[in-house]
Image (tube, rainbow, N blue to C red):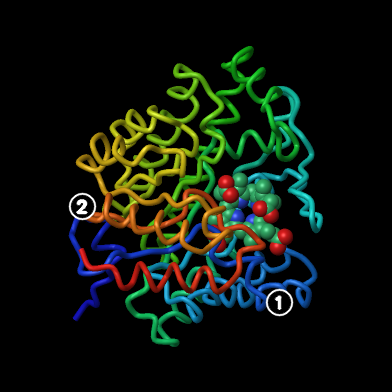
Amino acid sequence: MEIKKPFLQTLHGEMTESIPFWFMRQAGRYLPEYGELRSQAGGFLNMVYNPKNAAEITVQPLRRFGMSAAILFSDILVIPQALGQKLEFMAGEGPKLDALKEENDLSKLNSDTIDEVLNPIYETVSLTRQKLNDEGFDQTALIGFAGSPWTVATYMVEGGGSKTYEKTKAWAYGHPTSFQKLIDILVESTTHYLCRQVEAGAESLQLFDSWSGVLDEENFDRWVIKPTSQIVAGVKEKHPDIPIIGFPRGAGTMVFNYAEETNIQAIGLDFTMPQKWATDNLQHLMPVQGNLDPVSLLAGGPQMEEKAQKILKTFGNQPFVFNLGHGIIKETPIAHVEKLCDMIRGYKR
Ligand code: CP3
């Protein structure tokens, strides 16, 4: 008999007894056990490419909080690295990449051999699925993920994080034909990468488009909606039943077009999304996921409880996955996370 998993039931539009939940960046630096393993492993990427460590980190938060889903421990920037771009994570700083400056630089990327780099990640997926079963988390779904082409491209072109995305936007606006070549490479490699995660045991996928909110409407359509639709179509061709969650962060009301046009199964909402607008405009189209401000969880106390209750009440009448509106913050006290999980678990629809 197949065990029903509330997270997956919700993504398929069913109403479960309690509301499923997980948190973006649930495996990470707010957990002391993560810090311990990180210092033993000697850095973030050493953990990502070591299936045993990565599977262990994926399961760590579940042992404490029992979320409804585990998310593969990896990063969106493994795709540029697998394509041949130099990537480093320095402690306390963001990622650093050897920036692509112009069309000629695209010849440095090679999508034929990405699996040579990514194989350990597929192994992490199967090892994690095994570990979840071994540890009795048989109702916990495993989420695989990738960055969306636009967001990944910003890191590749800026050479790291940015406040303004001027280099990437200038390339995309000024030389769209050559920028399209970069996006096409990312669509192809990301589609392949996600299919391989499904084949290794991922039961759902999330596409992170963290910087989709910096584009105007026309460019949002071209660099966010179109490539996302292509990836969804490519993955569904091989794996028609895999539920894909889209998370176009900061996109405002353009989230509506994204939800309608990309063929995703569920939509992630950031914390700036007005809740009534989202229930009226999105939740009848598909299940939604979100949207507590991670700073509210960091601060804790009555304001967090009120905000969480309001989210549960507002979205809980239709299929809904509780999550944060962006990743959990490193300084977040464990006790606040415990309190929030208890509230979600105890909520009666
Ligand atoms: O959510 C999870 O628990 C799964 C693992 C995961 C990580 N990164 C691990 C990570 C996921 C899903 C991501 C996605 C990711 N990575 C995004 C999209 C979501 C978002 O946050 O907007 C982006 C933009 C990245 C790129 C990235 N990775 C940055 C900018 C940084 C440095 C800043 C930061 O938050 O530390 C990372 C590093 C990173 N990725 C860490 C973790 C646990 C911290 C590494 C460490 O220092 O231990």
Q: Report the residue at 73% width, 43% height from top.
A: 85
Q: Is residue 279 left or right of residue 197?
A: left
Image quadrant for the N terminus? bottom left
Q: Is residue 245 visible?
A: yes
**Which secondary structure lies at badge 2?**
loop
In this picture, is 229 found above or below 33? Answer: above
Q: Is residue 2 left or right of residue 113?
A: left
In this picture, is 248 found above or below 302? Answer: above
| Residue wearing tag 2 | 318
Quick one: label 1, few (<14), some, or many (20+) residues within 10 Å? some
Identify residue type, mark 1. Answer: Leu
Q: Residue 245 placed where, x, y %? A: 38, 49
**Which secondary structure lies at badge 1?**
helix
Q: Report the residue at 77% width, 66% height from top.
A: 43
Q: Is residue 117 visible?
A: no
Q: Residue 6 placed where, x, y %? A: 27, 68
Counting residues from the N terminus, which is met first, the one under dot 2 or under dot 1?
1
| Residue wearing tag 1 | 37
Closer-to-camera residue (164/125):
164
Closer-to-camera residue (27/48):
27
Q: Report the residue at 46% width, 61% height from top.
A: 302
Image quadrant for the C terminus? bottom left
Quadrant of the image where one finds ligand 1? bottom right
